Image (tube, rainbow, N blue to C red):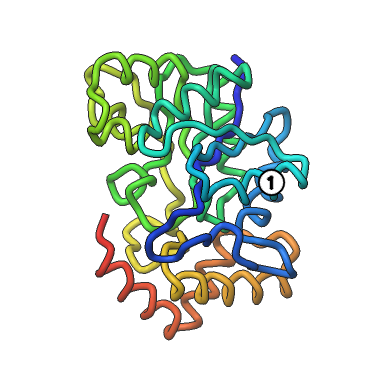
Amino acid sequence: MNIGIIIQARMGSTRLPGKILKKFYEGKTLLETLLENLHKVAGTKVIVATSVNENNDQLETFLKEKGELVFRGSENDVLDRFIKAAEANGVDGIVRICSDNPFMDWHGVAELVEKAKTSNADYIGFRINDKPSILTHFGFWGEFVRLSALMRVAETTEEGTPAHEHVTYHIYNHPDEYKCEWVAGPEFLQGRDDIRLTIDTPEDLKNALQVYSHLKCKYDNFTLQDVVAYLDAHEDIKQSMISTISRNKK
């Protein structure tokens, strides 16, 4: 199986427009920070899948100047965008990543890649608090899916439905039709619903930058446990996160 990492990205965020190209840490953008992490995963190509909407022209130019792989497809049919991005790059196994997660744990991505090499599952994802990690606010994990499974979804569902907007939604909601394999999230995060490091709002960006900057100054390669320890020692940031989570229930 040829496994690639595909990052879902666009400039048209309604709550924080252009967020992925906003400066984040040491002059690097949010997206660059994520890419730097993902390039640590050995033996996989990394592709940024954005849309043909003209507001993503700047994104394509930026990425190509950095030597990154870019694919442009449908704005609204994200499922189709992923299928075509995989086909265009000779990928038949995909680790899907959201572009607004600078704390993405690349070790977890590498674990998905290794598990996929020996598994016949259609989907492999982290599970925490008894639900898929993609439905949480942590922003720590990706998810693996086979191209063949995405093609089945495209053939059996209607355009304009959640299955086409949320790429893996149909798969993990139909375990009778698709083989899903789950990886337990770390024990120290089980039961917690007070951490939000996915970025959708200016407040999210401010909180994430404060955490990231502090940890980077202290540890070159900080861990998820370091993130949790920092948040537990800074109740003001945690309360800000809790407030945002309550307004953005998934």
Percent of width and height locating residue 98: 49, 46
Q: Residue furthest bottom?
A: 236
* Quarter-of-image position of residue 177: top left
Q: Residue at x 63, y 36 (%)?
A: 70
- Nearest the viewer among 5 and 68 is 68
Instruction: Give the residue at mark 1.
Output: 61
- Which amino acid does the dot numbered 1 rest on? Thr
Quadrant location, the C terminus: bottom left
Side (left or right) of 175 relative to 88: left
Side (left or right) of 164 relative to 115: left
Residue at disc 1, secondary structure: helix
Percent of width and height locating residue 60: 64, 43
* Quarter-of-image position of residue 192: bottom left
* Quarter-of-image position of residue 243: bottom left
Percent of width and height locating residue 179: 34, 19
Rendered view: 164 above or below 31: above
Packing grade of label 1 (10 A; few <14, some 14-19, many >=20) is few
- Nearest the viewer among 247 and 18 is 18
Rendered view: 213 above or below 74: below
Quadrant location, the N terminus: top right
Q: Residue at x 24, y 21 (%)?
A: 157
- Nearest the viewer among 80 and 184 is 80
- Nearest the viewer among 124 and 65 is 65
Percent of width and height locating residue 100: 51, 55
Number of disc labels: 1
Side (left or right) of 103 relative to 137: right
Side (left or right) of 145 relative to 39: left
